[in-house]
């Protein structure tokens, strides 16, 4: 009561805006009910609280409780202009119609209210004057009111972690818009052919360097889900001339603005571009999965076939296996990619090498290393920009001919 009187002596407040100042008190009450109850008590004790006639007049006027004999008239609420009750109904109705108009296949939603409205600023002024810790913001009340209406009328479920749609409310403009949350599907891809890039590789003249990409195959998800755009998030990427074998590379396919979300999930389990690309989709996932696979430097197992200008021996194989046992390799940005990337230094660990000869000049090796290792340069040395390298250790010039990724050791 003390804080209510203090607030109303200075500001005219409607039932809802007064009640919101004490939202953490009186569980189960609506803010308008809470405010009305406070004003009822104020009206009963106003003339017995030690206030003078002018203070009583100001108090009752700002509370919207005019007394004819005192000549008082109600004034508009300082925070909302006495518009919030009608505004809540309008926003709820507009939210329902906006979701209906979009006709998305959704079951979960989240209401978001834009910050920085004039109501919010005036409310902060009142709260700052009183020093309250019992209030809730007008944004929170709008979010709750609109959310309950949407859930009830459209039979949708509020979801704060993984919604299908966002209902965005602008208090100042009284506008409501609906944004479709991206559809994110976890999966893995296997690339059996060579000269297939992860993303379309365009030359300066607009022509494609490679006829096929992983993106091309995965774009079917956009078409089936009626989305607008595809973003591929992957645990690294192999060179276009590499094969990606084994159980594949973990990826997340993010479809922007999918209107047929459930249709895509029920239809898509596997994508393929026989006989070169196979994509297996496991389940829908969240943004946290995307962060996991992009941040990971998971170990990888490579197969290398390399050609030597000089004869190789079993002693050379043993030297490689012994030397590259849990050793850090220092690499400057390879010469072949300096046009696209800055010249930086990276350090990656090689955990082990297993090698065999197919001929005196042809070497095959399995390499287990950190992700992000430039594997071609591990073989050639790139003119000393990678050290140590196979060529440096053997003192013989080696050139990688074929490379495959056999395993991406990402724990999901």
Image: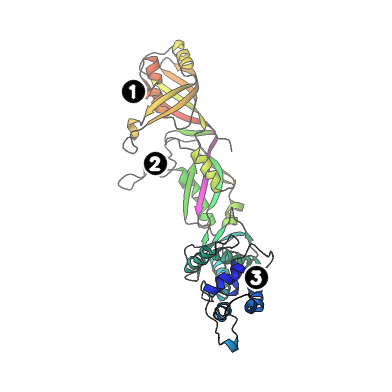
Which percent across, then down, holds residue 258? 53, 57
Compared across the picture, whether 29 is left or right of 103 comes to: right
Q: Is residue 125 above or below residue 70?
A: above
Disc 1 and disc 2: Cα gap in Å? 30 Å
Which residue: 46% across, 54% down?
Answer: 229
Q: Earlier in the sequence, mark 3 or mark 1?
A: 3
Nearer the observer: mark 3 or 1; the answer is 3
Which percent across, then down, holds residue 349? 47, 25
Disc 3 and disc 1: Cα gap in Å? 76 Å
Q: In terms of depth relative to the viewer, which is nearer, 68 or 186?
A: 68
Magenta highlight: main SS: strand
Q: Is residue 336 visible?
A: yes
Q: Is residue 213 magenta?
A: no
Crowding around mark 2 (Cα neighbors within 10 Å: few <14, some 14 to 19, many 20+) is some
Q: Which residues are magenta?
A: 246-259
Q: In terms of depth relative to the viewer, which is nearer, 257 or 223?
A: 257
Nearer the observer: mark 1 or 2; the answer is 1
Q: Is residue 375 above or below residue 98?
A: above
Which residue: 51% across, 73% down?
Answer: 78
Q: In terms of depth relative to the viewer, which is nearer, 4 or 245?
A: 4
Which percent across, then down, holds residue 153? 64, 69
Q: Earlier in the sequence, mark 2 or mark 3?
A: 3
**Quadrant holding the N terminus:** bottom right
Which percent across, then down, holds residue 395? 36, 15
Which residue: 50% across, 47% down?
Answer: 218
Mark 1 in CB contact with mark 2 (< 8 angstroms):
no
What residue sits right under mark 1 in the picture? 384
Residue 34 - label: 3
Residue 49 - label: none
Write down the quadrant of residue 23 in the picture.
Answer: bottom right
What residue sits right under mark 2 in the picture? 210
């Amino acid at each position: 009561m003390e804080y209510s009187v203090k607030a109303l002596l200075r500001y005219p407040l409607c039932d809802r805006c007064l009640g919101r100042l004490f939202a953490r008190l009186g569980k189960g009450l609506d803010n308008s009910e809470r405010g009305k109850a406070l004003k009822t008590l104020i009206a009963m004790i106003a003339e017995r609280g030690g206030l003078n006639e002018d203070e009583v007049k100001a108090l009752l006027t700002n509370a919207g409780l005019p007394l004819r004999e005192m000549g008082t008239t109600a004034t508009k609420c300082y925070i909302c202009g006495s518009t919030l009750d009608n505004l809540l109904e309008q926003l709820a109705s507009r939210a329902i119609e906006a979701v209906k108009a979009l006709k998305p296949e959704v079951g979960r939603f989240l209401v978001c209210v834009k910050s920085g409205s004039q109501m919010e600023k005036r409310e902060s002024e009142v709260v700052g004057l009183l020093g309250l810790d019992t209030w809730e913001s007008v944004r929170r009340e709008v979010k709750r009111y609109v959310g309950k209406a949407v859930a009830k009328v459209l039979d949708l479920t509020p979801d704060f972690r993984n919604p299908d749609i966002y209902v965005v409310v602008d208090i100042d403009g009284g506008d409501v818009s609906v944004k479709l949350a991206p559809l994110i599907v976890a999966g893995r891809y296997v690339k059996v052919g060579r000269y297939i890039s992860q993303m379309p590789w365009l030359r300066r003249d607009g022509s494609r360097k490679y006829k096929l990409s992983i993106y091309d195959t995965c774009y079917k998800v956009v078409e089936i889900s009626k989305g607008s755009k595809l973003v591929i998030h992957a645990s690294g990427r192999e060179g276009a001339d590499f094969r990606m074998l084994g159980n594949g590379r973990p990826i997340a396919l993010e479809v922007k603005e999918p209107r047929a979300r459930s249709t895509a999930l029920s239809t898509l389990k596997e994508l393929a571009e026989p006989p070169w690309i196979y994509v297996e989709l496991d389940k829908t996932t969240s943004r946290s999965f995307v962060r996991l696979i992009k941040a990971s430097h998971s170990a990888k197992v490579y197969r290398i076939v390399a050609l030597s200008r000089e004869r190789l021996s079993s002693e050379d194989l043993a030297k490689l296996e012994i030397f590259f046992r849990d050793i850090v390799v220092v690499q400057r940005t390879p010469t072949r990619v300096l046009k696209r990337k800055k010249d930086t230094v990276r350090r990656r660990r090689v955990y082990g090498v297993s090698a065999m000869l197919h001929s005196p000049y042809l070497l095959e090796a399995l390499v287990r290393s950190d992700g992000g290792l430039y594997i071609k340069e591990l073989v050639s040395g790139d003119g000393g920009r990678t050290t140590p390298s196979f060529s440096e250790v053997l003192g013989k010039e080696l050139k990688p001919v074929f490379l495959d990724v056999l395993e991406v050791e990402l724990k999901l």
